[in-house]
């Protein structure tokens, strides 16, 4: 009996980093997904296969001793095995079209799809239960995660997210078109988050003011997202980029891409932790192909839209 689940990656439209400190962020799920097929096995091992390689641990292994990029997925399998008093292992096969380590939520989407796929081998869980398992798993490698990435991956669409009050879907019937450019510079979310923490400690007032400005920006842009005012949304994205530069998470390479793509779009900014990873730019349907072709000549670029489905679970058979 196998169980299949899939979950989308994400872009952060507004508020990355600030969200870790309690401010609201706006995220969108994207039409790039990870699919996980899991199956109970007759061994005493949890085995994972993906395009990055294969790995296996005994079900008795303590998660603290696991030193693998698959740690969060082993955590999920172990947790669900234990909760269901299952005495054998699980095989997991991960297939993904979300670029890895680029700030597009690949690891969160994997946590969501793994939690959904494995739990479905035993019983059907509510979306919120799957979300909690996914966030707990992500915390095994990134303890400070705000939880925003997993949340948008579970529910899909465009959401407002705040650590204390959770998420709210921003209802809109419009189709948004983005170009995502991958700087191909690897980055570590936890290192950049630590750097922002240091910035906050030595610049308390500046940081507080930036949080307030970000909050005002997000209030304004929430209306523009609903009314599909692309000009205003683009301007707000460029403004958000300036705030991120003030936090020190941008660099010359990212700025070069932004300057290039800004000329042809409504606005552009870093998405995710910064210091590398991806740039997103808001475009419209008619110009999207042209911008995409231009960017593709020098960079790895993707044309993305907002995924409204979120996580999907397919019945075990
Ligand atoms: O680059 P990513 O996809 O890991 O995004 C990180 C977003 C932060 O706001 C910097 C951290 C978080 O947990 O929200």
Image (cartoon, rainbow, N blue to C red):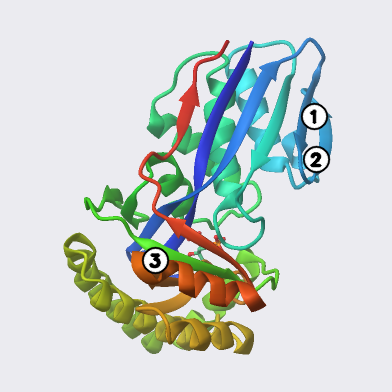
Q: Which residue: 53% across, 19% down? A: 120
Q: Which residue: 35% across, 78% down? A: 266
Q: Which residue: 48% across, 54% down? A: 10
Q: Which residue: 39% across, 88% down? A: 206
Tag 3–tag 1 contact (CB < 8 Å): no
Q: Can residue 16 be seen here?
A: no
Of marks 3 and 1, which one's residue comes earlier in the chain?
3
Residue 89 percent coordinates (x, y): 74, 18
Give the spatial CA distance, label 3 vs label 1. 39 Å
- Name the residue beneath numbered marker 1: 61
Regarding mark 1 in the picture, which secondary structure is present there?
A: loop
Q: Return the residue nearer the eye: 139 or 118.
A: 118
- Name the residue beneath numbered marker 3: 13
Q: Return the residue nearer the eye: 259 or 163.
A: 259
Q: Return the residue nearer the eye: 86 or 284.
A: 284
Q: Can residue 110 be seen here?
A: yes
Q: Residues within 10 Å of mark 3 (few under 14, many from 20)?
A: many
Tag 2–tag 1 contact (CB < 8 Å): yes
- State the image quarter where residue 238 is shown: bottom left
Regarding mark 2 in the picture, which secondary structure is present there?
A: helix
Q: Return the residue nearer the eye: 287 or 276.
A: 287
- Name the residue beneath numbered marker 2: 65
Regarding mark 3 in the picture, which secondary structure is present there?
A: strand
Q: Residues within 10 Å of mark 2 (few under 14, many from 20)?
A: few
Residue 87 percent coordinates (x, y): 72, 10
Q: In the picture, which quadrant includes the N terminus?
A: top right
Give the spatial CA distance, label 2 vs label 3. 36 Å
Of marks 2 and 3, which one's residue comes earlier in the chain?
3
Q: In the picture, which quadrant includes the C terminus?
A: top right
Q: Residues within 10 Å of mark 1 (few under 14, many from 20)?
A: few
């Amino acid at each position: 009996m196998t169980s299949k689940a899939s979950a989308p990656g994400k872009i952060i439209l507004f508020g990355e980093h600030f969200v870790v400190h309690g401010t609201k962020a706006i995220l969108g799920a994207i039409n790039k997904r990870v699919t996980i097929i899991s199956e109970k096995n007759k061994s005493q091992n949890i085995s994972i296969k993906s395009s990055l390689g294969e790995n296996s641990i005994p079900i008795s292994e303590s998660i603290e001793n696991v030193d693998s990029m698959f740690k969060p997925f082993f955590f999920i399998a172990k947790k669900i095995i234990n909760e269901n008093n299952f005495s054998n292992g699980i095989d997991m096969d991960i297939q993904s079209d979300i670029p890895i380590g680029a700030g597009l939520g690949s690891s969160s989407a994997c946590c969501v799809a793994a939690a959904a796929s494995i739990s479905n081998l035993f019983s059907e869980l509510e979306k919120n239960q799957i979300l909690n398992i996914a966030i707990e798993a992500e915390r095994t490698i990134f303890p400070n995660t705000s939880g925003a990435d997993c949340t948008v991956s579970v529910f899909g669409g465009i959401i407002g997210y705040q650590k204390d009050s959770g998420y709210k879907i921003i209802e809109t019937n419009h189709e948004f078109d983005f170009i995502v450019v991958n700087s191909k510079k690897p980055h570590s979310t936890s290192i950049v988050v630590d750097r922002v923490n240091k910035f906050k400690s030595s610049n308390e007032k500046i940081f507080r003011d930036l949080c307030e400005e970000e909050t005002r920006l997000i209030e304004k842009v929430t209306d523009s997202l609903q009314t599909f005012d692309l000009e205003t949304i683009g301007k707000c994205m460029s403004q958000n980029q300036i705030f991120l530069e003030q936090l020190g998470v941008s660099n010359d390479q990212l700025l070069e891409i932004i300057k290039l793509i800004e000329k042809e779009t409504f606005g552009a900014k870093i998405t995710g932790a910064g210091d590398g990873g991806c740039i997103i730019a808001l475009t419209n349907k008619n110009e999207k192909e042209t911008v995409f072709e231009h960017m593709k000549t020098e960079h790895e670029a993707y044309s993305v839209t907002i995924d409204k489905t979120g996580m999907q679970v397919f019945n075990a058979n």
